Image: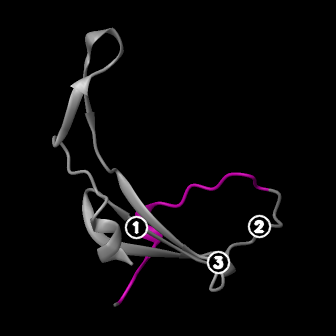
Amino acid sequence: MLHIMNNFDIPDGIVRGVGVGGRPQCDTTTWTSIASLTERRYVVRTQGGPLPYVVDLGQIDFDSGVRQRDVPLDGFVPLEV
């Protein structure tokens, strides 16, 4: 799936244009993600690092009442393929 998603990545500086007010604008793919609904896993890969990381949603307590959680990339588990 990650190889398929590579076909849709926009590298930094490839797509350029003029935005609102005449300011230069560059489109880029900041991150790519894949969700596995059956395995309850979320895979994310950022522009700055091609290594995919996995969030195991089965390990997160969604009943704690906390509505938003910040998960640093350091806390993710590298995905082995």
Mark 1 element type? helix
Mark 2, mark 1: which one is toward the viewer? 2
* Label 3 environment density (alpha carbons within 10 Å; few <14, some 14–19, many ≥20): few
Q: Amino acid at mark 1?
A: Asp
Which residue is at a point 40% across and 67% down the rendered structure image? 74
In the rendered structure, are the residues bearing label 3 and label 2 in contact, judged by CB atoms less than 8 Å apart? no
Mark number for residue 74? Answer: 1
**Left-right relation of 29 to 39:** left
Position of residue 32 measured from the top left corner of the image (x, y, whole percent): 40, 61
Calculate the distance from the C-alpha at mark 3 to the C-alpha at mark 2.
16 Å
Disc 2 marks which residue? 62
Calculate the distance from the C-alpha at mark 3 to the C-alpha at mark 1.
23 Å
Which residue is at a point 63% across and 56% down the rendered structure image? 69
The secondary structure making up most of the magenta span is: loop
In the rendered structure, are the residues bearing label 3 and label 1 in contact, judged by CB atoms less than 8 Å apart? no
Position of residue 8 measured from the top left corner of the image (x, y, whole percent): 31, 59
Q: Is residue 49 magenta?
A: no
Position of residue 25 relative to residue 33, above or below, is above
Position of residue 31 relative to residue 75, above or below, is above
Q: Earlier in the sequence, mark 2 or mark 1?
A: 2
Work out which quarter of the rendered image holds the N terminus and state it: bottom left
Disc 3 marks which residue? 37
Position of residue 39 relative to residue 14, above or below, is below
Q: Earlier in the sequence, mark 3 or mark 1?
A: 3
Nearer the observer, 44 or 23: 23
Q: Is residue 73 magenta?
A: yes
* Label 2 environment density (alpha carbons within 10 Å; few <14, some 14–19, many ≥20): few
**Left-right relation of 73 to 17:** right
What span is in magenta? 66-80
Mark 3 element type? loop
Q: Earlier in the sequence, mark 3 or mark 2?
A: 3
Which residue is at a point 77% across and 67% down the rendered structure image? 62
